[in-house]
Amino acid sequence: MNAGSTGELFAIYTLVNTLSDYYGSQEVLLTVDGEPYEGAHMVLQEGETLQFDEEMVN
């Protein structure tokens, strides 16, 4: 994703919050082609999860 650090973070947490809300989960394991997500400004480690972020709502 080439949207700048703020754009990437907002897009990722929009997805995480949507999935968390829809499925009622507290955390999301984000992978691409079976590997942890790796973007220009965010790299996740194996097994690292992202949690619902109340500050990104509204």
Image (spheres, rainbow, N blue to C red):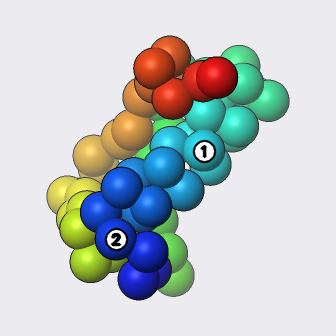
Residue at image position (51%, 29%) is 56
Residue 1 picture location, percent across and down: 44, 80
Left/right placement of residue 41 relative to residue 24 reads left
Residue at image position (48%, 49%) is 10
| 34 versus 55 height, above or below | below
Inspect the image, locate mark 2, and give the three-letter code of the amino acid beneath it.
Answer: Gly
Asked which secondary structure carries label 2, the reply is: helix
Where does label 1 land, which residue? 14
Residue at image position (64%, 23%) is 58
Task: Kindly identify which numbered label has been placed on residue 58.
Answer: none
Circle 2: is it few (<14), some (14-19), or many (20+) Cα within 10 Å?
few
Circle 1: is it few (<14), some (14-19), or many (20+) Cα within 10 Å?
some
Q: Sequence-wise, which precedes: disc 2 or disc 1?
A: 2
Where does label 2 land, which residue? 4
| 53 versus 31 height, above or below | above
Rendering quarter of residue 17: top right
Is residue 15 at least partly visible in the picture?
yes
- Looking at this view, is 17 or 27 the one in front? 17
Left/right placement of residue 43 relative to residue 7 reads left
